[in-house]
Image (cartoon, rainbow, N blue to C red):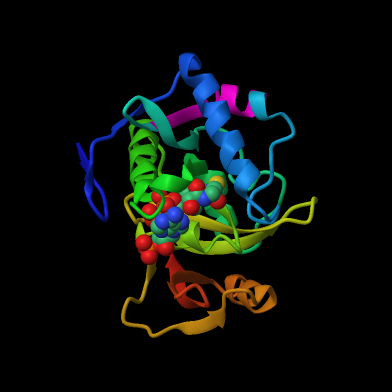
Amino acid sequence: METFKTSPMPVLTRLLGEADLSQLVNLRECILNGIKSSELYLREDDEFDFLTKHLALSGRTVGVFKDGELIAYGIVKLDGDPIEGGTLSGQFNLILRITKSAIMQSSMVKKEYRGLGLQGHLLRFRERIGRERGCETMFSQVSLANSYSRENLLTNRYVIVGIVRHSNGSVRHVFAKSIDRSFYSCDASSTGTWVDAKNINEQEQLFEKGFVATRDDFSERLRFIKHNLTI
Ligand SMILES: CC(C)(COP(=O)(O)OP(=O)(O)OC[C@H]1O[C@@H](n2cnc3c(N)ncnc32)[C@H](O)[C@@H]1OP(=O)(O)O)[C@@H](O)C(=O)NCCC(=O)NCCS
């Protein structure tokens, strides 16, 4: 039994396979239909292909079940480009090219089970998979409007290392976590520079100067700290 934020809840967490595909498609469809802004999450061009290839070929999909029902899932991509479709300026571009990465691709929780910490649980489960595969760096791309995912990644010691603008117009923060923390260090005592979470230009200037964002403040502001790259 796993224990979550508000109450102990008996759930089963396991890797999904082909036999779980219809439950996965239904859960995702139900959640996607409930997302009002396309800025928050964009459907894949071929949803079925996307889900199928992350069951075994390009990655793994982790599912959380309650009484046999799939209530949440998270995908980890174990090959490919973490910045897919965009370019990342600044120093972390180098880390992208020289380290083996796992990409936290997509996670969704059924409405009735939100606020229990399931997204963080799925994140840590997928990190273990990445680590077992020898990945040194974990990456994720998240919409600037998705404050819940941002909060969960920052709490789990990811830092925001840049912004990617995609050709379809979407803008995403890039999160990274060095598993043994060997690539960068930040001065924890620094008060840093607080920037409006929606001010893309100011954030981009700081990323260019070698800053990363390490915390947020009720989703309104992000704290930037200068980091030292040690590769
Ligand atoms: C983003 C998402 C995965 C977060 O999952 P989660 O397991 O609910 O995350 P948490 O339990 O850490 O909760 C995060 C916050 O969600 C809020 N929340 C959202 N819906 C809630 C609900 N119905 N009940 C309670 N809290 C809710 C809470 O304020 C909570 O903050 P807290 O720390 O103050 O409790 C989930 O909201 C979701 O599936 N959203 C739609 C899909 C999506 O945007 N996915 C991310 C991009 S792939």
Report which quarter residue 14 is drawn in. Answer: top left
In what quadrant does ligand 1 lie? bottom left
Quarter of the picture containing the N terminus is top left
Picture layout, residue 208 above or below residue 98: below
Residue 151 image offset from top left, x and y in percent: 44, 63
| Residue 63 x, y percent position in the rendering | 40, 31
Q: Quadrant of the C terminus?
A: bottom left
Q: Residue at x 39, y 38 (%)?
A: 126
Image-based side of 213 in relation to 197, left or right: left
Of 3 and 141, the residue lying toward us: 3
Residue nearer the viewer, 120 or 135:
120
Give above or below for 116 relative to 62. below
Is residue 153 depicted above or below 192 in this figure? above
Residue found 61% across the figure and 47% down from its top: 34
**Residue 126 visible in the snapshot:** yes
Rendered position, 73 above or below 155: above
Residue 59 in the image: x percent, y percent? 50, 28
Image quadrant where residue 40 sits: bottom right
Q: Which of 48 and 231 is in front in this view?
A: 48
Picture residue at 53% right of the left edge, 20% below the top: 21
* Residue numbers of the magenta segment: 49-63
Along the horizontal axis of the image, is 57 left or right of 32? Answer: left
Magenta-drawn stretch contains 223: no
Q: Please state if 35 lies on the left or on the right of 119 as rendered.
A: right
Residue 173: percent from left, percent from top: 59, 60
